Amino acid sequence: MSRLTAIFVAVCSILISASVGAILYMMFGLSGAESAVVGVAVLTALGLYTAMTSRGRDRSDVSMQIADLSRGTGDLARQVAELGRRVVAVESKIDGAVDKALAATEPLASEIGELGVLVTRLAESVAAHDTAASRQIQATMFVAPSSGTSSSAPPSEASAYGAPAVQQAPPAKPAVSPPSEARSDSILELGEPVPPPFKGMERKAILEMLARAIEANRVDLYLQPIVTLPQRKVRYYEAMSRLKTDDGEVVPASAFLEYAESSGLMPKLDNLLLFRCVQVLRRLLLKNRDIGLFCNISAPTLTSQLYPQLLEFLEANKALGPSLVFEFTQAAYRAMGPMEQESMAALAERGFRFSMDNLTDLRFEPRDLSERGFRFIKAPGALLLNQATAATSNIHPADMSDLLGRFGIDLIADKIEGETMVVDLLDYDVRFGQGFLFSPPRPVRAEALQGITERNDVVARDAPIADEPRRDPPADGRPAGTGQRTGGIAALARGVVVRNG
């Protein structure tokens, strides 16, 4: 706008000076040069006047701006002073509030300290209660260790079952040494050397002795705890079978398993073990609803003549499905055919879960196992920590626990016998452990299995046994292989001979 005004003033000045020169030339008779000089002089005078008036006006505007700036500076100074005053007031209020808060929290802090002491005492009381409960379970469920059993422990291990205290491997026994016993934790373990009770015996004699032991119900049930890591709280038990010879010597499963499988005795042995596992599991659930029991089962049982009765028995006890886990070896699972897979699917439909143990490598598909009902993978701790395993496996052992967890499968490290192994497994995020470090397998008391013999719930015997003489039918005229039908287990004993142990 100011530029347009200046241009307008300049144009007007030129017109005025040109008009003055023209008037002097035309009316007063001045020459053209004189008229031009006069016009230039008039133009110069007008320019000087315009410049002087503009400068005065600019000076007035600058003075007004300076005055406005001075007033703004003063307002800003007043506002800064007010802000400083308010900050001081807020600081004083904050100091007062902090003092009040400290005064109010001091009694609360003392009360929290007292509450911490009470919580500590409560934790000690709960720990003492758990210890007493564990001792009660041991007293009611397990036989006291003795020198006549292969899984007896030294006095330091005779405390509460599954106690977190460090335990030593049991000393050598005549039947089997502790390392061999540690390798024979699973009922389906193969390839163990023949123990002393079978030395010098022919195969037929061994088979006859096994048949007599099963018929006479001389198969004891042992339990070994599976604990949480690092808390070492008992979460599950694994059931293991031990056979008593005619002389009363205890033989681990690793010694007679090969003979039992080759002679067709495994279905009978698995049925007897399953009956006892159900009985013991019911006892355990009365004391702890979160407990679980692993029951080993062989692949031949899934296709045997006894499987329909076994399935009927499990149908009647499917309420125990969340707590009863059937365990298969890795080799048995890989060798399963369509019939075995179908039998496993029938068990899974009834709510029972599966576990895989005796792993020789880590090459498996977690998604496939999860879809088939597997919820546990039990791998030896030495296999997980072996550097060669990582080079030959599909997945590094350190990542296995997380991978299995994505498919709802828990990883259990078994055969743990040293604290160093526990520390290394914790780095692999392993949440469950089993082994002689925590507790050896311990026999279940006869009182806990008393309900089985009272109902004549023993192993069925209608399947043929290799190298076993045929038995004559009963004298009462009933078909061979029939027995007394009593209680909820009678359906499973249908078509079998029953004999109390």
Image: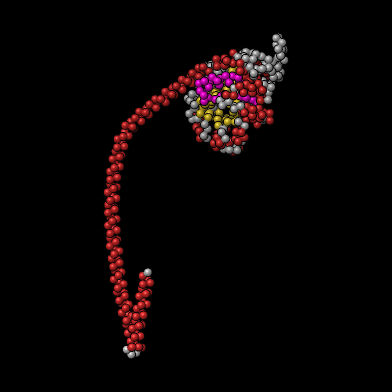
Q: Which of 143 and 3 is in front in this view?
A: 3
Q: Can you tell which quarter of the image residue 376 is in? A: top right
Q: Residue at 42% of width from left, 26% of height from top?
A: 123
Question: In the displayed structure, does residue 285 sit left or right of residue 126?
Answer: right
Q: Can residue 74 be seen in this view?
A: yes
Image position, residue 340 (x, y; %): 67, 28
Which x, y percent locates residue 71? Answer: 28, 59
Which residue is at a point 58% across and 31% down the rendered structure image?
Answer: 375
| Residue occupying image coordinates x 68% and y 23% | 304
Image quarter of residue 394: top right
Tell me, yes or no, if residue 384 can be seen here.
no
Residue 428, x across and y down, in percent: 52, 35
Left or right: residue 479 compared with residue 48: right
Looking at the picture, the colour scheme in use is secondary structure
Query: Which range is magenta?
Result: 273-299
In the current view of this chain or complex, which residue is farthest to the front? 27
Above or below, 34 against 400 in this view is below
